[in-house]
Amino acid sequence: MNYIDHEDFVVNCADRRFTDIEHTYQMVRQNTACRLQIGSYTCGGYFFGLTQWLKKNPLPADAAGYDLVLPVFSESQLDWLSVADDILKCARHIVVNDYGMLRHFSGDKRVRLGRLLFRDYRDHRYKEYETNRTYQAKAVSLINVLREMGYEIFSVENDMITADYAVDLGQIHIYYHFPYRQVSSAHICEFAAIGKPVEKKFIPDDACAFQCFDVKIRHEAGYMKIGRSVFDILPESWLSAMPRSRIIYTPRW
């Protein structure tokens, strides 16, 4: 199907090789219906590396902007936000994945709630999802709580839970990830431990040389480990059955 035949189409390059970002960005610039998404959903180290790479390889200023995904930073990484000032200024949307960043950017109309804020089970082994058409997405209750706390929510994103998954949030814009559904994520990165002595393995937020760029773990059950995240891949029929909507499309790894 023609993925771009949607109201709003985002090409997701979060957690990708930096050279992949540059290549994809050149493609996106040729189509005014698309924009690029960069950053990370799970890794502060990757995010800092991206900011350093962008200083040497800035994206052209004549473009329509990009969406920037902020990971869940550890306390020692919070200063990295100041390093990203220039990148944040150019972002069309800022995707936050924890309540600390939501509070930090409160009132900014560019803020979009990221997929990690919603705690729905994303796993094809839960077969009841396929038959339960009255499934109540956790996004609904979370948005209600945040509104009661005084937050104004402009847009959210989420993974598709079932084939007929659709959430009604009124005037709030909803983006759906496709085809990679993020099933889970880890706090400790096993790839950062590659080549290190055993006493220095599996340290939270440990420095690395981006070993995840070169290692992908695929399971026969359809799961894929990329960096700190586990994904499965949704069938194209899920998307074609949906009404026109906003799509965050991740190119195949």
Image: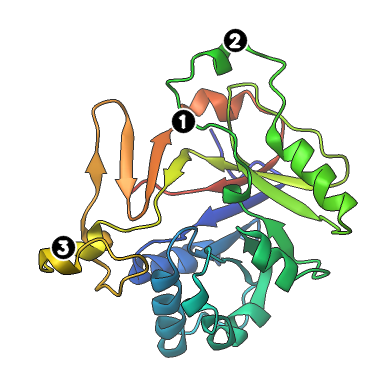
- Residue at figure coordinates x 51%, y 69% from the top left: 73
- Residue at figure coordinates x 47%, y 69% from the top left: 26
Q: Position of residue 109 (x, y in %)?
A: 81, 66
Q: Residues within 10 Å of mark 3 (few under 14, many from 20)?
A: some
SS for callout 1: loop
- Residue at figure coordinates x 77%, y 37% from the top left: 140
Q: Residues within 10 Å of mark 2 (few under 14, many from 20)?
A: few
The first of marks 3 and 2 along the sequence is 2
Between marks 3 and 2, how big is the CA–CA gap? 42 Å
Q: Nearer the viewer, mark 3 or mark 2?
A: 3
Q: Which of 6 and 95 lies nearest the eye of the viewer?
A: 95
The residue type indicated by label 2 comes to Thr
Residue wearing tag 2: 131
Decide: is 155 above or below 208.
above
Between marks 2 and 1, how big is the CA–CA gap? 17 Å
SS for callout 3: loop
Res 194 label: 3
The residue type indicated by label 3 comes to Ile
Q: Position of residue 154 (x, y in %)?
A: 81, 56
Residue wearing tag 1: 234
The residue type indicated by label 1 comes to Leu
Q: Is residue 166 left or right of residue 23?
A: right
Q: Position of residue 241 (x, y in %)?
A: 62, 23
Rendering quarter of residue 111: bottom right
